[in-house]
Image: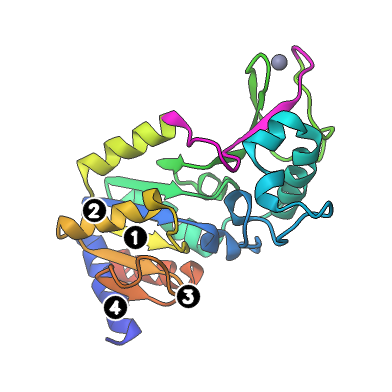
Amino acid sequence: MRQADVLDEVAALLREARSVLFVTGAGVSADSGLPTYRGIGGLYQDKTTEQGMPIEVALSGRMFAQRPELSWQHIAAIERACRGARPSAGHVAMAEVEAHVPRTWVLTQNVDGLHLAAGSRNVIEIHGTVHRLQCTRCRRARAVDDYSKETIPPRCGACGAIERPEVVLFGEALPRPAVELYARELERGFDLVFSVGTTSVFPYIAEPVLLARRRGVPTIEINPGESEVSDRVSHRLAARAADALPEIVRRAFHR
Ligand SMILES: [Zn+2]
């Protein structure tokens, strides 16, 4: 099928949908100029650190507990790479869908906060966010725009202990409130499920597509390359989110 026909079909499905889920990953943030490699939220380019340590080790929960200063060097470098990034046209298009489809949710692996910055309200940040810090001792949490005014590692204003970002480090469990919310919304089901800019290597990221398929619900993948779910979706667009999503929204709601 021609790409234009797929766009029209997907737009027609979106126009009729009463509920939609967007599952997003690093590719969406790549459209905002963020690097899409490994590490927290995909935001790390190098396979090893300057110390010759794999990034999965430097950014693990275990390393943070033992040598938080070392983990923080890398967390701060990642945050610097995201700083000043603006939502892409893909983020903005997903936020616009909320105005048209009564029950719209975004499940994102990204920790950069760009879905919220674009205006989406129903966002599950399953890997957390760099925009909140929490004290490792007294658990006091606070919001931060960026880390430019922070000492690295940042310390709690109440008790002086080192703070950590509210992101899921390697080897750590997913945040329970996000997991529970996600499970509840998945259980309710969706009329339409999009997989956007993610290779879906994590089972909990591929699951909505597989579940929708079992229920006979249309599924759409928007990703320039092949992924774990490419041969499972009902509609596939080999495109960037920033190109395909605004076009789908325009065809669905603006003509
Ligand atoms: Zn504290």
Residue 49: assigned label: none
Q: Nearer the viewer, mark 4 or mark 2?
A: 2
Left or right: 168 as drawn, with respect to 234: right
In which quadrant is the C terminus drawn? bottom left
Boundaries of the magenta span:
158-176
Q: Do the residues under discs 1 and 2 have CB atoms within 8 angstroms?
A: no
Residue 213: x and y in percent read 21, 60
What residue sits 44% from the left and 70% below the top?
223
Residue under the image location 21 percent in, 40 percent down: 188
Query: Which residue is tagged 4?
Result: 6
Q: CA distance from mark 4 to mark 2?
A: 22 Å
Front of the two marks 1 and 2: 2
According to the image, label 3 marks what residue?
224
Question: Magenta segment: does it hold 120?
Answer: no
- Give the residue number, with chain letter if any, for mark 2: 211
Question: Between tags 1 and 4, which lies in front?
Answer: 1
Question: Contact (CB < 8 A) between labels 1 and 4?
Answer: no
Task: Give the main secondary structure of the magenta stretch.
Answer: loop
Give percent across and percent down for residue 25.
49, 57
Label 1 – label 4 distance at C-alpha: 13 Å
| Image location of residue 64, percent across then percent down | 70, 34
SS class, disc 3: loop
Q: Secondary structure at mark 1?
A: strand
Which dot marks residue 194?
1
For label 4, count other residues whose C-alpha is less than 10 Å away and answer few (under 14), some (14-19) or many (20+).
some
Q: Quadrant of ligand 1?
A: top right
Between marks 2 and 3 in the image, the one whose residue lies nearer the viewer = 2
Q: CA distance from mark 3 to mark 1?
A: 14 Å
Residue sitting at x 35%, y 32%: 180
Farthest residue to the left: give it. Answer: 216
